[in-house]
Amino acid sequence: MANLLVEIGNTAVKAAWAEESVLGKTVRYQGEKVMDFIESLIDKQQPLVMAVVSVREISQEEENRMKSLCQYLLLMDANHPDKLSAYGIPDYLTYDRGASLVAAKYMFKGKSCTVFDLGTTLTVDYLDAQGRYLGGNISVGCRTRFKALNRYSRALPLVDTPAEVRFPGDSVKGSIESGVISGIMFEIDGYIRSNPENIVIFTGGDAIYFAKRMKNSIFVVCNLGLMGLAIITDEYVKKNIQ
């Protein structure tokens, strides 16, 4: 029986069905009616386990509603931190970020890793060759930087992520594009050079955009969080249900 995996992030919700630790097609939702979206996925098939990882706290009403949709509910949010702590993930990390690290440990076992999540925020996390979490950094994501320049400076327009960047910029718009994109590239390059022996993993909504601009050898895993959730769910089933 298949499991339903749901990742509730800062700006979007991603979901996928999984057989054991193998993901099916991923669907994405941006909107306020998260529970309605989840219910729409269960229209024809009830999951054995519905595993939900969320950056925000799930209300008791939402939790009760989720329980009614599946045989078993596996919830990872501020009120349910124990599932990720069992994998050596510190409780101060957001739970989607923690799930991504579980996947990185599984996929690159025996390798030290630098994991970049390029989305609303830019997070950088480090794992040693034994899969132990060494710490990480949080910075401002690409689109968030464009919005901040527009919001906090009256003279600067709101600019979207450009398809191509001229360096250096030759107009106000071009200077914003070059400043933001080049700044992130320099930032990423500095992190990579500080640990050149590490496997480098990109995930998040802007992973492919920046991966195309990299000269270094990297791995792009867009659904790293869902993959980690699939691994956690599969192990939960084997330990508690089968």
Image: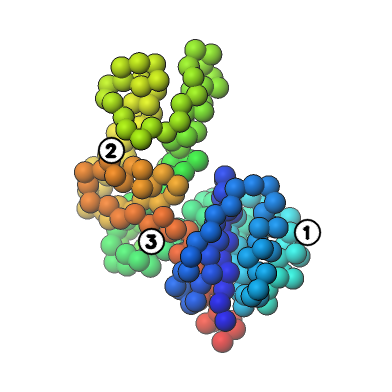
Identified at 70% across, 58% down, the residue is 36
Q: Can residue 82 be seen in this view?
A: no
Q: Which of marks 2 and 1 is nearer the N terminus?
A: 1
Q: In which quarter of the image is the C terminus?
A: bottom right
Which label was assigned to residue 104? Answer: 3
Residue 65 coordinates in the image, percent (x, y): 75, 64
**Residue 117 coordinates in the image, percent (x, y):** 42, 48
The N terminus lies in quadrant: bottom right
**Vertical placement of residue 20 versus 179, above or below:** below
111 and 145: which one is in front? 145
- Could you tell me which residue is drawn at 59 percent across and 83 percent down? 241
Amino acid type, residue under disc 1 in the picture: Glu
Residue receiving disc 2: 190
Q: Could you tell me the amino acid type at mark 2?
A: Gly
| Residue at mark 1 | 61
Tell me residue 188's x, y (percent): 32, 40
Towards the viewer: 119 or 27? 27
Q: Which residue lies furthest to the right in this view?
A: 61
Structural distance between the alpha carbons of marks 3 and 2: 21 Å
Identify the residue at horizontal 38%, vertical 68% (top origin). Answer: 106
Mark 3 residue element: helix
Q: Is mark 2 on a helix, strand or loop?
A: helix
